[in-house]
């Protein structure tokens, strides 16, 4: 029997609503960055480009969370995050009020640009 991938195993432990919400978030990120590796980072599912830093992560606690693995990215999107519970390192959301797909794509692109700038 094949052991499930770490992201699949993590998601399998969640209640159905959180699982569906985070599976959708996972798919949006995978579609935006098809070459990304799925990794576990800080005990949560994450994504990185081969040989690079983790650029996104997600987890379920009381709510669902998106983690850009940067202390600066979410501050740049403060207006779009208004009304949501967020800090420099995470934005929380519920299955009933998920992050919009386009916002997720923009957050991912912003983080990838930040990583590229750090390499210069």
Image: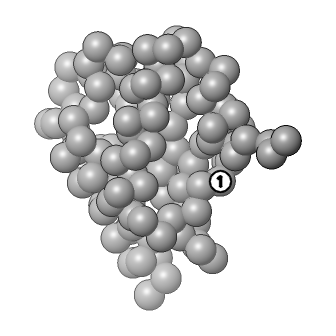
Which residue corresponds to the image point at 39% horizontal and 51% vertical from the top-left? Answer: 29
Question: Residue 10: percent from the left, percent from the top?
Answer: 66, 32
How packed mark 1 is, by other alpha carbons closer than 10 Å (few <14, some 14-19, many 20 or more), is some
Say whether residue 106 is left or right of residue 53. left
| Res. 98 in view | yes
Quadrant occupied by the N terminus: top right
SS state under label 1: strand
Residue sitting farthest toward the right:
1
Residue sitting farthest toward the bottom:
120
Residue designated by label 1: 39
Question: Residue 41: percent from the left, percent from the top?
Answer: 67, 48
Q: Quadrant of residue 25?
A: top left
Residue sitting farthest toward the front:
1
Question: Residue 87: percent from the left, percent from the top?
Answer: 40, 32
Q: Nearer the viewer, residue 101 or 43?
A: 101
Which residue corresponds to the image point at 35% horizontal and 17% vertical from the top-left? Answer: 95
Question: Residue 4: percent from the left, percent from the top?
Answer: 73, 41
| Res. 72 in view | no
Q: Quadrant of residue 26?
A: top left
Q: Nearer the viewer, residue 18 or 108?
A: 18
Quadrant occupied by the C terminus: bottom left
Q: Nearer the viewer, residue 88 or 19?
A: 19
Number of marks:
1
Which residue corresponds to the image point at 18% horizontal and 27% vertical from the top-left? Answer: 82
- Indicate whether 34 appears above or below 89: below
Which residue corresponds to the image point at 38% horizontal and 36% vertical from the top-left? Answer: 24
- Colouring mode (rainbow / by chain / secondary structure / one colour): one colour
């Amino acid at each position: 029997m094949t052991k499930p991938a770490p992201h699949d195993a993590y998601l399998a432990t969640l209640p159905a609503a959180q699982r569906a919400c985070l599976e959708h978030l996972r798919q949006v990120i995978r579609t935006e960055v098809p070459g990304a590796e799925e990794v576990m980072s800080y005990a949560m599912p994450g994504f990185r480009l081969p040989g690079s830093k983790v650029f996104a992560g997600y987890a379920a606690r009381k709510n669902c969370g998106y983690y850009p693995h940067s202390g600066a990215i979410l501050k740049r999107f403060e207006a779009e995050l208004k009304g949501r519970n967020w800090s420099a390192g995470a934005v929380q959301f519920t299955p009933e009020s998920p992050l919009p797909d386009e916002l997720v794509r923009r957050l991912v692109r912003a983080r990838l640009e930040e990583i590229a700038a750090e390499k210069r």
